Image (cartoon, rainbow, N blue to C red):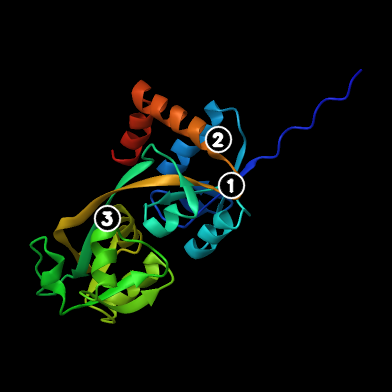
Amino acid sequence: MPARAAPAQPLELVTLQYPPYQYQDNATVKGFVVEIVQEVFRRLKLRVNISVYPWGRSIAMVVEGHADAIFTLYRTPEREALLDYSHEVLAQQAVSLFVRKDSPIRFSGRLQELAAYRFGVVRTVSYGAVFDNAVKNGQIAIAEVAASGEQNVDKLLAHRFDILVSNQMGARDILKRHHVESQVRELLPALEQIPSYIAFSRKRNLGDLRARFDAELAAMKKDGSYQRILNGAHP
């Protein structure tokens, strides 16, 4: 009887602690984007391991070829030169600004109006073209750089800076879990609506896999399964 071929090794995917999109809960990685990614690969009949690391480490692992793909990330020219982005949007995200409840700061939608205030960010995180370019051009001053969104919220409440910039759903989730919703106010409108993606390692030459992922994700959007997962995240 011929020997059976050994099963292919699972793909190694990396991400960051970013609830409710993706997050580590004991030994399990959860979140609605995790569900989408897992369903795509299930349809492709491919096994995956998903690991949560600090964001900078996750990006480096894929760039250097130590992991196959990373999610959920924005497009930037610097990243596109190093990573093979999906064409299909994995999840739409809104970037918002948050202040302490008693703050007098108001926002009309023009970031330049807030140039006099101190901002807090998370290390190596992109906040979209509007905010990133304002920082690059010296229009916005970064006062504090945190290791996580949770740490950034703590610094805002400790008066270390004036305005927290964050993914909208991510910040709302942190505020709710830490029971400090009543101490923080979101400035409206949202700063920017930004698509986010999965991106594959160029060093591992996964262009064919990226194309198959795109096709299956598009099929999920067409058959309604993608929206059903989103509806579960937004009851």
- Relative depth, front residue between 69 and 202: 202
The amino acid beneath tag 1 is Asp
- Going by the numbered disc 3, the residue's amino acid type is Gln
Residue 130, how many percent across, how many down?
23, 60
Assess whether mark 1 and mark 2 are in contact (beta carbons under 8 angstroms): yes
- Left or right: where 209 falls relative to 127: right
Which quarter of the rendering shows the C terminus? top left
Q: Is residue 180 visible?
A: no
What is the crowding at mark 1: few (fewer than 14 residues within 10 Å), some, or many (at least 20)? many
As drawn, 209 above or below 110: above
- The answer to whether residue 191 is left or right of residue 173 is left
Give the farthest residue toward the top. Answer: 1
Residue 87 percent location from the top left of the image: 40, 38
Q: Which residue is mark 3?
A: 168
Residue 7 visible, this angle: yes
Of pointers 2 and 1, the one earlier in the residue sequence: 1
- Disc sitting over residue 68 in the figure: 1
Distance (Cα) linking label 2 and label 1: 10 Å
Please tell me which of labels 3 and 2 falls first in the chain: 3
Q: Nearer the viewer, mark 3 or mark 2?
A: 2
Q: Point out the tag, 3 or 1, that comes first from the N-terminus.
A: 1
- Residue at 39 percent of width and 41 percent of height: 90
> Which quarter of the figure is the N terminus placed in?
top right
Of marks 3 and 1, the one in the foreground? 1
Residue 133 point in image, percent of width and height: 26, 65
